[in-house]
């Protein structure tokens, strides 16, 4: 029994060492390629979550994201979604992001409507957060997710487009907001920006391509 415990301890120590070396080498690679400003922003946005705090490792999709848009009258948001998807596919190599026509094909669902209707229609784990968030997403370990934009409370079209871009992009694993860059899609304060900043693009590529 003691030998077994010692053996398990050795394996655990080796795994921890391998994990440490992997993290060290990844950080060393990043630090050689990117500025300290970009590294700092990556760590803030990717290695932290707005509601859960610090992350041990980044989350990212390992399968193609297939998006189904629930029935909507907001055709301008569907057009904007297609624009965002095209931009993301130019930034990300390992997976493709697609808009599909059938629920059966989808692993990610977007709802444009009122938060109470979204809560009724989907099994929202953190439903207590919906009332205070006009845009919201949840992602799950099996590469599935849901999000909504509250088009009832959010009257301005540019604000709706901003929320769509922010929540969808954060669903990819860029989970945290920041006060650093007002032009960033991840800015903590209220904005209506509908474009990725240069540093946004860089950290998206870092997460998926390196």
Image: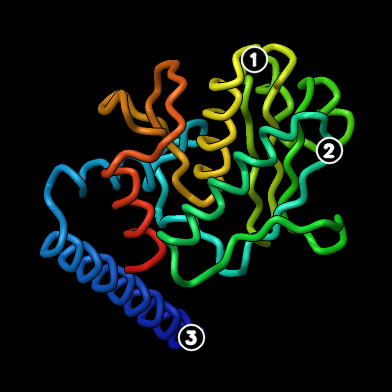
Q: Is label 2 or label 1 in front?
A: 1
Q: Are marks 3 and 2 in contact (CB under 8 Å)?
A: no
Numbered mark located on residue 122 in the image: 2
Kindly identify the residue that appears in the image at 38 percent across and 59 percent down. Answer: 207
Task: Name which of mark 3 and mark 2 comes first in the sequence.
Answer: 3
| Mark 2 to mark 1 CA distance (whole Å) | 20 Å
| Quarter residue 92 falls in | bottom left
x and y percentages locating residue 89 in the rendered image: 49, 61
174 or 201: which is nearer to us? Answer: 201
x and y percentages locating residue 162 in the rendered image: 52, 28
Structural crowding at the residue carrying mark 3, measured as other residues with C-alpha within 10 Å and reported as few (<14), some (14–19) or many (≥20)? few
4 shown above or below 87: below
137 shown above or below 157: below
Q: Are marks 2 and 1 in contact (CB under 8 Å)?
A: no
186 or 144: which is nearer to us? Answer: 186
Kindly identify the residue that appears in the image at 38 percent across and 47 percent down. Answer: 46
| Quarter residue 115 falls in | top right
Q: Is label 3 or label 2 in front?
A: 2
Question: What residue is disc 3 on?
Answer: 4
Numbered mark located on residue 154 in the image: 1
194 shown above or below 115: below
50 shown above or below 66: above
Badge 3 element: helix
Badge 2 element: loop
| Mark 3 to mark 2 CA distance (whole Å) | 47 Å
């Amino acid at each position: 029994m003691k030998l077994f415990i010692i053996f398990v301890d050795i394996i655990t120590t080796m795994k921890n060492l391998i994990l440490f070396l992997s993290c060290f080498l990844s950080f060393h690679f990043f630090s050689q390629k990117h500025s300290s400003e970009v590294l700092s922003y990556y760590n803030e946005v990717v290695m932290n979550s707005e509601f859960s705090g610090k992350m041990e490792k980044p989350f990212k999709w390992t399968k193609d994201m297939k998006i189904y848009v629930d029935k909507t009258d907001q055709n301008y948001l569907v057009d904007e979604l297609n624009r965002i998807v095209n931009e993301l596919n130019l930034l990300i190599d390992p997976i493709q992001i697609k808009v599909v026509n059938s629920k059966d094909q989808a692993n990610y669902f977007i709802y444009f409507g009122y938060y109470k209707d979204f809560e009724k229609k989907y099994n929202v784990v953190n439903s207590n957060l919906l009332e205070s968030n006009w845009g919201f997403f949840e992602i799950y370990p099996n590469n599935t997710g849901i999000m909504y934009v509250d088009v009832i409370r959010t009257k301005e079209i540019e604000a709706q487009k901003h929320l769509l871009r922010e929540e969808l992009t954060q669903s990819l694993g860029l989970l945290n907001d920041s006060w650093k860059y007002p032009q960033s899609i991840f800015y903590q304060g209220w904005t209506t920006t509908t474009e990725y900043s240069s540093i946004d693009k860089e950290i998206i590529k870092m997460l998926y391509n390196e």
